[in-house]
Amino acid sequence: MKYYRIGALFLGLALMWLMVPMESGAGDYRDLEKQVVEHTLPNGLKFLLVERGEAPVFSFCTTVHAGAVDEQYGIGGIAHMMEHMAFKGSQTVGTTNYAGEAQAIERVDNAYEAILQERRKGVFADSLTLARLEQEFREAQKAADAFIVPNEYSKILDEEGATGVNAYTGADQTVYYYSLPSNKIELWALMESDRMTYPVFREFYKENEVVQEERRMRFESTASGRLLDEFLSAAFKDHPYGHGIIGTPSDLKSFTRRDGRNFRNTYYVARNMTTAVVGDVDVKQTIQLAGKYFGDMPDRPLPPAVDTKEPPQMAQRRVIMEDAAQPFFVVGYHVPEEKHPDFPAIEAATDILANGRSSRLHRELVKKKLAVQVGGIVGPWGCQYNTIAIVFVVASAGTDIHELEEAYHGVVSSLCSEAITPQELQGYKARAKADHLRRLRDDDGFANQLTYYEEFRGGWRNLFTHLDSIEALTIDDLLRVSERVFTKNNRTVAMIVPPAEQE
Amino acid sequence: MRGLKKTAMPIGFLVIVLLSLCGAAYAEKQWEQLSYPPLKEIKVPEVARYEFDNGLVLFLLEDREFPLIDVRASLKAGGAFDPADKAGLASITAVVLRNGGTESFPGDDLDVYLESIGAQIELTTENDRVIINASFLSEYDDDILMRLADLLMRPAFPDDKIELAEIDEQTAIAARNDQPFDIALREYRKVVYGPESPYARHTEYATIEAIGRDDLLAFHRSYYRPDGMVLIITGDFKKKDMKKRVERLLGGWKQPGEPLPEPPAVPEMQARGIYYAEKTDVTQSTILLGHLGFRVDDPDYPEMRILNEILGGGFSSRIMNEIRTKRGLAYMANSIPGYAYPRPGIFGAIAGTKSESTLVAIQLLEEEIRKVTEEPVTEVELERARSGLLNSFVFEFDTRSEVANRVGFFEFYGYPLDFLAQYQQGLREATPQSILEAAKRKIHLSKLSVLVIGNKAQFAGSLSELGEVVELDISIPEPPSKLEIPEPTEESRERAREILTKAAQLEGGKETLAELKSLKVETDAKISMQGMTFNIFSTEIQLFPDHQYGSQVLPFGQGTAVQVFTGDAGWMKDPRGLQDMPEDQLVDAKADQIRDPIRLLAHYENMDLQALDPIEEDGQTFERVFVRTELVKDFILFFDKEGRFVRMDYQGKGPQGPVKASMRYEGFTEESGIGFPSTVKLYHDGELFLTSTLKSVEVNPEVDMTIFEKPSE
């Protein structure tokens, strides 16, 4: 609820460079695999449980296989909105009397939908009618508010010592997580199952205002936010990855609580999510609690997936934004989905190109004073479907952005002309392993990875074979994918240029 | 339930809803029925502490689960020690220490080496300290520790890496107004600590330019030292071996002669002010309230910690509830707790709200703060906050590196090792009354300043309702002049007047020029930018002394742009719309009139001039006159061998920031006894930027005064 994936990425451009190595014999990470216990409830909800660690704490993570990519036209942003709604409580948490509240919420829904209908008439809308409807809406909200125990969900968890209570929404997934002292495992089972099984989307239209503020903060009030919005819609012409995550201003103002409920009922089904619990937990007891509390979730079929495929890009696309902000550019290249066998090679090539002080772009652009920052990432918005790899370059003061772009393309083409050296590939392998393993070091990271692999990478066990596919990479693999991916017609360039001077 | 039936909902869901309704009746507040087993005892691992003769304190904690070692060193070498005129020195020193490497192992080699083994060494500069973090495989421990010690004691500080770090800083300066949040935090520190405080200081082009390699060496000598440094190592090693290794590597590092410098003092609490910084491209205001806070070892800390939870610390706080949950006015709305470890922190609040609701949000924040200083918090709130803090205490100990790092942190800032236990005791003893008393001691509504970054044109209401508003000038000062101009003498002043007199005569004489009433000039301009060339047809009407009207036909059929300047005000109109000239453009327009050759040659007697030594360029000798004026920097006029005014150099503004501008006048056209150049070329940093060809000139045309009037929208 406090950030979602794309925001986090660009806030932390510099953070992409994390690494810790793991070569030596002590503690082979594959041993961790044996500590994972899988348990699936009759309704299809899967649990992955790991007992480990010294401290009396545990972390959980639930990955729902639903995100912005699953939104139809007109409800852009509803997945993210549902993430916010998950903190509003349930039929027992956050209310003084749910039966009464449910009726009051109905009245709010009806009032809001009536306003929408009248507004759709545009210039023919009757202002008196509108004023009356708006009055009714305010009164209905007030009546519904009377049943609310504000933020009770967070209060209960805070009071019991929960930390890191949060969630995020990506194009592919919505993820919920927090940590608790380990004697509170039953509280977790109760609270988490409750909001997943009996959610109540209270204060929907006020929370919607909050999301609009989030949009203003992340996208509208910064030049980089405005550019990225344009970039994404230029990079995809058919696939919903191009719609972004937060939703358009008009969708945010026009989707309704009922739209949200429909989305939730379709996508938040037990079979479509995985929960991991990692830390100082008794696996047997946790399985028992899972059955007791999550067993109520209905057993419903898997939701539809997105069958639209982004067609091959036939021509370069360019987005030029004039703005006084610091000039920078982002280049996107279409690449296959992460299940594709070439995906590891594309990640490797992108990393060697753009990440770390010894990367090609850093050496050629940053160390030569043309740029102050470079970075690359594959599928930042999502990669369960064919996606894009992006590289960004931030110009140093006084550098002509067009000259910088030219230099950039020169470096990119060197990936094909001056073959990747064994040293570069070896370095990548060392960093990728470190990265992969660091994610497993803490309980919350481990829980997150288990659920991600289960939902998106063909099962959690692949978490422990992932490094084999990296170890197997050859220079030829990287060359082959580079030649295909880093081409002129396959790229979308978005840049901020200084405003043309008008004198 | 009538609404539920109306919507098309799967039967399964309906059943569940009905079931849960039944459930709700008997199992209300299920969470209150849960009973928890006692929490397992927290086993706090013991961290070994060693102090060497040179003052270095080392903490070691083994963690053999992974073959990894983490190093964290803290040094009292933070930004607060920057000399005022060299802000940025601490940060540049840290960056170049890492990027420059040592004589025997240069930075570029270090980059390649570290990345090839997946290791990292990174430095971070804060106000109060520099932190070095290193992380690597235990099999490389000898090598990396040796490199680290070498970097600390014998950095090379090579010039090219200094330049690179300075470019980084300059770029950051150029971009520092891009994000409203960056502006807010920068200005907030000035509001709370006072604009001159070392804790609010930030870089400028001038302070970066003032920094040279000698400064880095001196800073390193004074502040990178074993005494005051705390080194924490956790991971896969044997304590005894590691201690020996560190002693061998760093035990011989000598303290400098001078004692460890004390950090600069924090000033008194500032008076309340209402501050506003304009950023017109935002749809949301960033609002900060604040005044000086206190240190964590203040006796009121446990109470204030609880109070912060209640007021605006978390999702269930009062501020969050009033502003976000109840009213949907903000995504971000929090209190700022007031305490910090090294020195008094900042107490206040922060919110981001759509421009229109700026004032409402400020009032709500102030109201919530006021309430906690007047009424005790409720027992329920207190219990909830206290339980939350006590229950989450276990997370202070959930990893070994956390435990070791905290012990080191306390040592570094002089906190007792049992500080956490004291604090925990304080939490247990707090009462609504003791919290109210603490709030009264620590929160001062009359001192609470307000800072808003936003677009006031879209505010509902005016900030002046809150008090007198100080508009902050956040424009970025240009780099200082690098020119070295000798002190003027009577002789050089006299010589300058002679040169100008002659030049004026060649263009018609200063009297003729001074008598000019108006002028209309049409030109064709060619602008080269970003590898493209644009043609712009331009008309300029001057009504002396200070009215000016310019219009340009824009390229690519984009329409026409108009600018009008009338001495102290102006407006602009282009296809995007009509607006008053912003402050910085007014300044530019004034500077433009100062540089106008006709005004220069007509009124040179009123100006502060001095002749410089002639120079040779391209086989020609030019006489030069320096013009000292506030608005135009590095302003030098050039005259050819006949004495004709042919060129002026000055600091100008290019599309991408400050440039060295050079305006060259070529050719000669006479009109009504006055000479005009037929071509004007403008160079930016030595590259041709604009060529303007004279199309027509009218001397003393009738000027329709209505052209200066701002049209209605």
Image (cartoon, coloured by chain):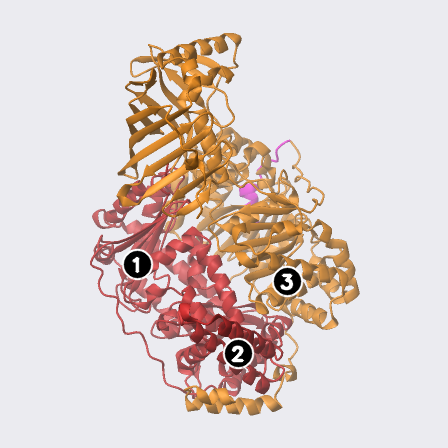
Quarter of the image where one finds residue A407: top left
**B103 inside magenta stretch:** no
Q: Which mark is residue A234?
A: 1
Horizontal and vertical percent position of residue B552: 33, 37
Q: Which mark is residue B143?
A: none
Sequence-first tag of 2 and 1: 2
Relative side of A22 to A240, left or right: right
Chain under numbered label 1: A
Of tags 2 and 1, the one toward the viewer is 2
**Chain (red):** A
Quarter of the image where one finds residue A8: bottom left
Chain under numbered label 2: A
Chain under numbered label 3: B
Query: Which residue appears at 34% of the width and 67% of the height?
Result: A466
- State whether residue B490 is above or below residue A129: above
Residue underneath mark 3? B312
- State whether residue A279 is above or below residue B156: below
Query: Which residue appears at 47% of the width and 28% of the height?
Result: B546
Marks 3 and 1, Cα distance to the nearest angstrom?
A: 40 Å
- A15, B131: nearer the viewer: A15
Residue underneath mark 2? A108
Relative side of B391 to B680, left or right: right
Q: Decide: few, some or many residues near mark 3? Use Cα within 10 Å; few <14, some 14-19, many ≥20.
A: many
Query: Which residue appears at 44% of the width and 20% of the height?
Result: B600
- A418, B228: nearer the viewer: A418
Horizontal and vertical percent position of residue B318: 65, 66
Magenta stretch: give its range: B243-257
